[in-house]
Image (tube, rainbow, N blue to C red):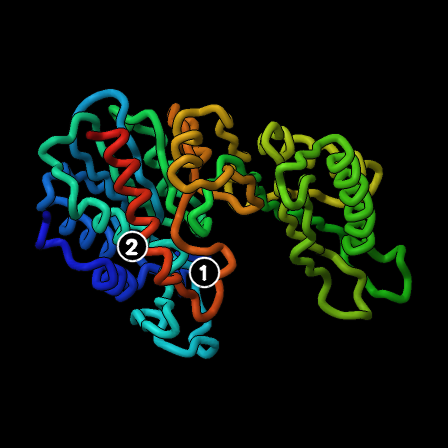
Amino acid sequence: MLQYIPDVKTLIRQLITIPSVSCTNTDIDQSNIGVIHHLAELFEPLGFTIEIQPVDSDCKKANLIATIGTGNNGLVLAGHTDTVPFDESQWDSNPFSLTEKNDKLFGLGTSDMKSFFAFILEALRDVDLKKIKQPLIILATADEETSMAGAKAISKRSVNGARQAVIGEPTNMKPVRMHKGMMMESIQLTGLSGHSSDPAYGQNALEAMHEVMSNLLLWRSALQSKYRNPLFAVPVPTMNFGHIHGGDNPNRICGHCELQIDLRPLPGMSVVDLRYELHRRLSDTLEGHNIQLKTVSLFDGVDAMETNADAEIVKIVEKLTDEKSEAVAFGTEAPFYKSMGLDTIILGPGNIVQAHQPNEYLDIANIAPFTLTLKQLIQHYCL
């Protein structure tokens, strides 16, 4: 028994205490280096080989790759070390301090998903790591909540010896083998401003955007007619109009208008193909208009993910949890691990209902059963 591993609540407390917010707003964005170094200090004494992989040129963001054992059929346990921003005024406790109340552990990252690494260490407490026969690889990534730069960086290299991966995102201990993809696009139209008393004085970008939105709604209906998967609670691809801004005054013809959309494709739909079709449709809609079109991808996008229902990792996790694998609408880093040839499943002790919410918490009742599941997976694949 590894007595020098702190108890699981202490481990969670240590991780929660280290801020690692990632945000597209640079004034809010924080480094995750503190979390990475702390995890390295926890895994290295256990015999893990530690690699810290820089993700940005300033070395403010990094991944941890911790490996023990050799072979060609090992297990990856993966998660992200960043959290979303928070509104402290809506919290009843300090987000960076673990608070135990009503059989729950409150803190930023308890559910999504710093606590996953504490569970891994707790699962290793009674494992004889000297008997490892296949590699156990721990991946701790940066910036999942924004750019997924950490997972992208890992996907460009090899993770030797692994065949399957478990990502500890919040699933309330129910296995997930399928999720939708995500793309976020900015559509920017530039016309010509002028005095509102005469439309001939300008080219109204806001009116042109009205036509664009009408066409996008038709495209959404076409996509939802063509693609459907009953395994999802929302069985069709979705398109959300999330942000729009145009013009500056009611007595000026609108010279510029921007619309930001979110599109969630099903497995079998390619983000690259959708982006091409989006631009084609927009160009056709605006043909003959004296309007300039610019589209900007707000991030690279993530394809949908599907692991075959008959994959070994799916069958084993379903057996260990006594739960049928599910499909979810939220995205994860799984497509990057799938691209590396890893059969991937998502399984975590937190609940997605708590993710990104004030007073985020983890149910204490989940600690023992989830720790056992991780221990059984490690024993099956690595011992």
Query: Residue drawn 80% across and 70% down?
Result: 250
Q: Is residue 201 above or below residue 102?
A: above
Amino acid carrying mark 1 in the image: Asn
Observer able to see residue 57: no
Residue that protrudes farthest toward the top in the picture: 72
Q: Upstream in the sequence, badge 2 or badge 1?
A: 1
| Apparent side of residue 325 relative to residue 337 in the rendered image (left or right) | right
Query: Residue drawn 26% across and 66% down?
Result: 17
Cα separation between marks 2 and 1: 15 Å
**Can you tell which mark lies on residue 32?**
2
Amino acid carrying mark 2 in the image: Asn
Q: Quadrant of residue 295?
A: top right
Q: Residues within 10 Å of mark 2 (few under 14, many from 20)?
A: many
Pick whichever, 256 or 133, lies toward us.
Answer: 133
SS at badge 2: loop
Q: Quadrant of residue 268?
A: top right
Query: Residue drawn 30% across and 57% down?
Result: 31
| Apparent side of residue 144 relative to residue 201 in the rendered image (left or right) | left
Observer able to see residue 277: yes
Q: Quadrant of the C terminus?
A: top left
Give the image location of residue 256, x and y in percent. 71, 55
Give the image location of residue 258, x and y in percent. 67, 54
**Can you tell which mark lies on residue 25?**
1
Give the image location of residue 19, x and y in percent. 30, 63
Q: Is residue 13 above or below residue 46?
A: below
Pick whichever, 284 or 95, lies toward us.
Answer: 95
Q: Quadrant of residue 139?
A: top left
Give the image location of residue 110, x and y in percent. 36, 60
Pick whichever, 138 or 6, lies toward us.
Answer: 6
SS at badge 1: loop
